[in-house]
Structures are given as C-alpha cells and as structure tokens.
Image: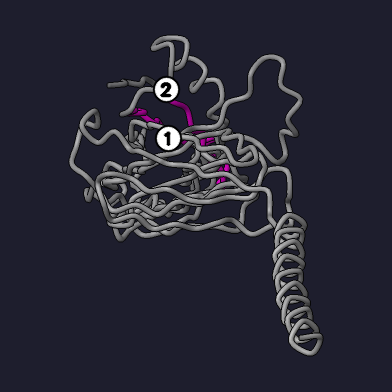
Amino acid sequence: FEVIKEESYMSINKKLIFLLSIVGICIAACTKEKIDRREEGQVTIVPKWEKYNGSYHPMKYYFYNVNKTSVFPVIVEDVTTEGFTQTLPVGTYRLVGYNTDASEDLTFDVSRNFTVVANFTSYPYSTVPLDLCIVSADSIVVDDRAQITKEIVPSEVKTKTLRLQFQFNNMQVVSLKGTLDGAFASINLLNGKAIKDAGNISFQPLTPNEEVKFRISDLYYSPNNSNADPSLYKSMLSLTLDIKEDDTIIYTKTGEMDLETIINQIRSFYNDIPDDILLYVNVENFNPKSKDRVFIRVNDFKGN
C-alpha cells in the first residue's frame, strides 16, 4: 500500500507542477503582451458623398503624425463609397485625401511637411477640368483604445483664370514673349488653397494680339502689414517684344510692370480675387528715342 500511495503522490505532484507551469506561461505571456502592446486607436473616415456636388471618386489618403516629424505618413487607398477604418498609434494626425482619377494634367508632390501639393500646368491654358476633390481634416486626436469616426464632406478644388489682352500703341509688334511672376499654379490639398511659392510663368503667344490665358490657383498680393521680402514675393509682368520700324528694321525691346497695385484694386472692387480676371494691358514706347524699352500699364480690368 505504501508503494501505491507514493506513486499517487508523485502523480499528483507532476500534475501540480504541470498546472503551475501553464499558469506561469500564461502570466508571462500576459505580462509581455502588456509591456509590448502599442498604444493605439482606431479612426473611421466616412466621406459624405451624398452632400458632394458631383459623383463618387476613388480616394488616396495620407495620415501625417504632426507630433513626430520623422515618421512617414500612413497611406490608405479607398475604392468604396462607405469609407474605411484605420488603426493608428496614439498622436495628433493631419488627414489629406484626394481622388486618384483626377486630371492627367496634375502632378502630386508628397515631399512637403504634413501635406500633399497638386501642381498643374498654368500655360498654355488647358480647357480640361481638374476634376479634383479633397477629403481632409487638419487635426484628428487619437487616444489609446479610442474609436473615432470622422464624417467629412468632400470639397471640389477650383482654379482661377487670368487673361491678358495686349494693346499696342503706334508699334508694329512682330513677336511677344513674357513672364508672369506672382501667379501660382499649385494647391495645398489640406485646404484647397494656393501654395504661394516663389517662381514665374513663361508664355509666348502665337501672335502678339492673341489673348493670353493662364490657369492659376491665386495671385500674390501683400497685405498692408506684410513684412514679406519684395525680392522674393512680388507680382510682376515682364515683356520682351520684337518691333518692326520703317518696315525693315526690327528692334528688341523690354519692359516690366508691377501688378500689385492693380491686384489690390481688383480685390477691393470685388472683395476677393474673382475666378476669371481679364486685364487690358497697354504697351507703348517708353521713349521715342529709346531703342530698347517699352512702357506697360493696365488700362482696365474685368472679373467674373
């Protein structure tokens, strides 16, 4: 009987050790899970397409963690109409979304901090609509274990049209080319507004009397309290003209005009920059004795 009792005790001890081992493994696993668990939450994005003045578009989204500049954005593509749910580490996020079936004239720049920029060709003018919309939010706060739903109405991104109609006084202009500084051809897809980069747009119409059209996102103007460096930010029209005199001799002449005054007049008249702006640009000899300069001014403007 003693042998049987001893074997029974040994069997019980083995079972107890086995059970304790299982409990130890479970405790260790739970402890490791608690230590290793990343603090994160879930964000559900629901585009309200029924409130959009247009049809549904497949979208591409960028979640930028504004607290961690070294972290790459989380990118999500959504081809449904219902939206999507994304798990994100705890933080404050900026959401930038745009439709992937927009005009082929657009290029997208993702090198900026916390946004995507759409660039388009300003000249020659394209009659093809951009067909660009955005689903964006400036601040989404993700807490640990949070479940957030953001309903966002898509917004159509629109551009403006700037037209120049040249008028030449007592000059036989053979050819015309120029640059327009202070007109922008890029859009911040966070808010649909212009990215005001320094740069200029070159143009050369087929005939000097041809109306020159530009597709732009905005025009530069400096508020009264602006401290902007005028060498970097300006609105300037520069022209180079080949002018025939005496029916045989051709002179090349140049001229510039600061457009900021006329832009501020337009803003004051319309309380904004209109979607379609026409400037009547008058060009005349700067000095009859000068062979290389012309005088440029804007006689009138119209906006729609």
Instruction: Give whichever of discs 2 and 1 has the lower sequence position.
Output: 2
Q: Residue at x 74, y 57 (%)?
A: 70
At 72% across and 15% down in the image, what residue appears? 225
Work out how far the residue at label 2 is from the one at label 1, CA to CA, in angstroms.
24 Å
Type of the residue with mark 1 = Val
Q: Residue furthest left?
A: 55
Kindly tell me whether residue 165 is visible in this rendering: no
Q: Which residues are magenta?
A: 277-298
Residue that numbered label 1 is attached to: 283
Viewed as shown, does residue 13 lie left or right of 213? right
Q: Quadrant of the N terminus?
A: bottom right
Look at the numbered disc 2 and give the secondary structure of its residue.
loop
| Quadrant housing the C terminus | top left
Q: Please, is residue 223 above or below residue 135 in the view?
A: above
SS under mark 1: strand
Residue at left 75%, top 73%?
21
Task: Residue lying at the far front in this picture: please name it.
Answer: 1
Q: Residue 126: x percent and y percent?
A: 27, 51
Residue 297 lies in the magenta-colored region = yes
